[in-house]
């Protein structure tokens, strides 16, 4: 039986090993890592999937900021990585982790400005993410525009830079 628990219940070394298995050891070079920078994951929106005391999946969310040219900023939550052990990737664990995180985000009001880099067919179909407002966003690395997705009433549109938000507002 799968149990979804706060990510703090999992050992950091186990999470890193899972991420290496799911995405490869070169994952740190990806644009998503540059967007979130040295920020700390948002504990209330980050979870682990545990089965028989073994980590089989995880989801992490990160504070990021959108800065348009006019000086105003918008805080967003970057969703991902959603990682599942490769041998379990067709078992619905990623969807279960996303549903759990989205429910928690709705409870806390954090669901009004979510973004991610991912498969538009999957994240659009099952979770309502799209690239409608992200077309002019600048990121600190390459991105396939159709994979830069967002959802929520407070997602900004227009030209601007996306990057790490190191400290959460008080």
Image (cartoon, rainbow, N blue to C red):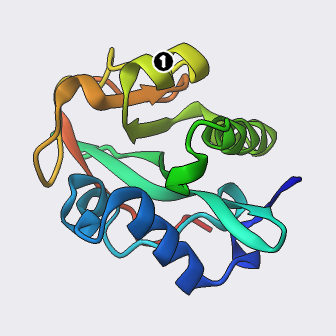
The reply, left or right, for residue 151 in relation to residue 88 is left
Q: Secondary structure at mark 1?
A: helix
Tell me the crowding category of disc 1: few under 14, some 14 to 19, or many 20 or more residues within 10 angstroms, Cα based.
some
Locate residue 98, reporting x and y percent.
64, 39
Locate residue 117, reporting x and y percent.
34, 39
The reply, left or right, for residue 102 in relation to residue 121 is right
| Residue 165 in view here | yes
- Measuring 67% from the left and 43% from the top, which residue is drawn there? 93
Say if 159 sits above or below 53 in the image.
above
Say if 82 sits above or below 111 in the image.
below
| Residue 158 in view here | no
**Which quadrant holds residue 126?**
top right
Say if 125 sits above or below 18 in the image.
above
Locate residue 109, reporting x and y percent.
71, 40
Observer-nearest of 86 and 127:
86
Observer-nearest of 137 and 158:
137
Q: How many discs mark residues in the rendered view? A: 1
Residue extending farthest left: 142
**Which quadrant holds residue 103?**
top right
Observer-nearest of 112 and 31:
31
Residue extending farthest front: 87
The reply, left or right, for residue 128 in relation to residue 101 is left
The reply, left or right, for residue 40 in relation to residue 95 is left
Q: Which of the image's four quarters has the C terminus?
A: bottom right
Observer-nearest of 13 and 145:
13
Q: Which residue is mark 1?
A: 124
Locate residue 4, reporting x and y percent.
80, 56
Say if 60 sits above or below 136 in the image.
below
**Which quadrant holds residue 60?**
bottom right
- Measuring 36% from the left and 58% from the top, which residue is drawn there? 23
């Amino acid at each position: 039986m799968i149990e979804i628990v706060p990510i703090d219940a999992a050992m950091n070394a186990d999470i890193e090993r899972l991420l290496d298995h799911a995405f490869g050891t070169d994952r740190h070079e990806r644009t998503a890592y540059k967007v979130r920078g040295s920020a700390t994951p948002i504990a209330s929106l980050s979870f682990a999937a545990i089965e028989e005391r073994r980590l089989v999946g995880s989801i992490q969310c990160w504070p990021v900021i959108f800065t348009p040219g006019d000086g105003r900023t918008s805080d967003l939550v970057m969703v991902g990585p959603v990682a599942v052990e490769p041998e379990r990737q067709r078992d619905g664990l990623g969807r279960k982790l996303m549903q759990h995180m989205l429910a928690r985000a709705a409870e806390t009001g954090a669901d009004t400005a979510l973004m991610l880099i991912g498969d538009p067919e999957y994240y659009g179909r099952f979770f309502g993410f799209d690239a409608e407002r992200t077309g002019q966003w600048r990121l600190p690395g390459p991105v396939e525009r159709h994979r830069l997705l967002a959802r929520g009433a407070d997602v900004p549109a227009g030209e601007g830079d996306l990057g790490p938000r190191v400290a959460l507002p008080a």
